[in-house]
Amino acid sequence: MNTSRRKFIRGSAAGVVGAPFLFSGTADALLPVDDIDWGMGFPEGSTLLNRNENPIGPSAKAVRAAKLGVERSFRYADSILIKSLLSDHHKIPEDRIIVGTGSGEILNLAPLVYLPEQNHNMVATLESYRPIPGRAERLGRQVKWVQLSAEDNFAYDVDRLLAAVDADTRLLFMVTPNNPTGTVLSFDDARRLADGLPGQVILILDGAYRDFQEDGRDEIDLIKEGYENIVITRTFSKIYAMAGLRAGYGIAHPDIISRLSRFGGSPTSTNMAGFGAMAASLGDDEFVAESREFVRSSRKYYERELGALGIKTIAGPPNFILAGTGENTQSISDELRARKIFVRPAVEWGLPAYTRISYGLPRENATFIAALKEIIRA
Ligand SMILES: Cc1ncc(COP(=O)(O)O)c(C=O)c1O
C-alpha cells in the first residue's frame, strides 16, 4: 500500500464515514491487518487520560472468552445467559434486567421512552455526564439544570433536586458516583429522592462507576424492595476494563424494562466478544479487587503529586480526578496536547477552572505529571 493511502486511512480513523476507497471492492483496497491503526484518531504514542477508560485492560479470562466469541461471531449473540448470570449475581429476577450495547444504550432509551410529549422535561445536574440530558435537548425537551456547589464539594442536595421537579417532569437523571466530580449519592438519599418524586417521574441512577465504590448499600436493594420508579444502570466498561466491548445493563421494575425494551436493549444488542467477556468477568472478585486497588493507588499518586504543585483535587471512588487548574486550564490542556497528552478541561461540565484526568498506567501518569511540571514552571 502506498504511503499516502496509508496516511489517509490513519487520518480517517477518527470516524470519517464513507471514505470511498474503503468500499471500492477491489482486493487492493483491503487494509492489511498489520496496518490497522488502533489509535482511534489520536496520534501514535499518545497518552490518553481523557476518556475514563480503565487502562489495566480486561482480565486474561475475559480476553480468552472474547476471542472464543470472535471465532463464533458468524452467529448472533443473545443476552439470555448474561441475564441469568446477572440475575444470580444481583439476586434479582431476570424480568428486571435489560442488557445493552454498553450502559449507554439503556440510558439513551430513557429520554425517547419517557419524554414523548413536547412539554415533558428532565431534571439533571449541571456538573455531570451530559449525553443523556443532551439527548433530551436534541429531542426538543427542556432540561432543568440543578447546579452543584463547589463550596459544598459538589455534594448532592436532595431538597434542591426535588424542588426542580414540576408537573411536566418525567425523568430525574443522577450519576452516582458522579462523572466528573466523584460525588456519591448515598443509599438513604437515593431512597429520599425516590420517595419524594411525584408518581410520573422516573429516577435514573447511572452507576457506570458504582463498582469502584467500596462502601454503602447497593441501590439495587431499592428495586428489590419494590420501588417502581427507579432505573439503575451499570457497565462492564469501567470496573472490568471492557469499554471497547460495549457491554452494560439496566435494572428496574418489569414495567420499565418492557417499556425500554420496545426501543432497544434487544437480545442482539450484545456482541459475541462482549458476550464471552461478560460471562467470564461477572463476579470475578479477584479482578474487581485488582481494579479497585489500581484506582486507589492512582488516586493517592495524583493527590500527592498535584498537591505538591499546589493544585487542589477532588476525587471520589471512580477512576479519575478533578484538578483545580484555575484560569490556565485551557492553555495547560493545549500544551499537554502539543506533547500528545490528552486530558479533559472540565468547562464542558460547567467547571472552567478544573481539568478531569483519567487514571492511566503508572508510566502514563508519570509522563503527565512531568509534562505538567514543565508547563507550570515555564
Ligand atoms: C457516567 C457515565 N455513564 C455512562 C457511561 C457510558 O458507559 P458505557 O460504556 O457502559 O456505555 C459513561 C462512559 O464514560 C459514563 O461516564
Image (cartoon, rainbow, N blue to C red):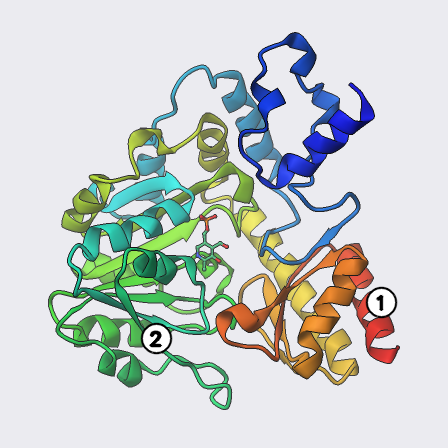
- Above-or-below relation of 56 to 26: below
- Above-or-below relation of 21 to 147: above
In depth, the one of 186 and 13 nearer the eye is 13
Q: Which residue is mark 2?
A: 145
Measure the alpha-carbon separation of dots 2 and 1: 37 Å
Please state the horizontal and vertical placement of residue 183, each as a whole percent of the image.
Answer: 46, 74
Residue 373 in sight in this render: yes
Image point 53% across, 17% down: which residue? 71
Going by the numbered disc 2, the residue's amino acid type is: Trp
Q: Dot 1, how many residues are within 10 Å of its Cα: few (below 14), some (14-19), or many (20+)?
A: few
Image point 48% across, 64% down: which residue? 213
* Picture quadrant where residue 262 is located: top left
Please state the horizontal and vertical placement of residue 152, each as a whole percent of the image.
Answer: 47, 88
The residue mark sitting in front, 2 or 1, is: 2
Q: Residue furthest front?
A: 20
Whether ligand 1 has any atom under 8 Å from the Cβ at mark 1 is answered as: no
In depth, the one of 193 and 292 nearer the eye is 193
Question: In the shown orientation, is residue 292 left or right of residue 309?
Answer: left
Quadrant in the picture for the N terminus: top right
For residue 158, the mark is none
Q: Which residue is mark 1?
A: 370
Q: Secondary structure at mark 2?
A: strand
- Above-or-below relation of 371 to 17: below
Going by the numbered disc 1, the residue's amino acid type is: Ala
Please state the horizontal and vertical placement of residue 276, each as a whole percent of the image.
Answer: 48, 29
Q: Dot 2, how many residues are within 10 Å of its Cα: few (below 14), some (14-19), or many (20+)?
A: some
Mark 2 / mark 1, whichever is N-terminal: 2
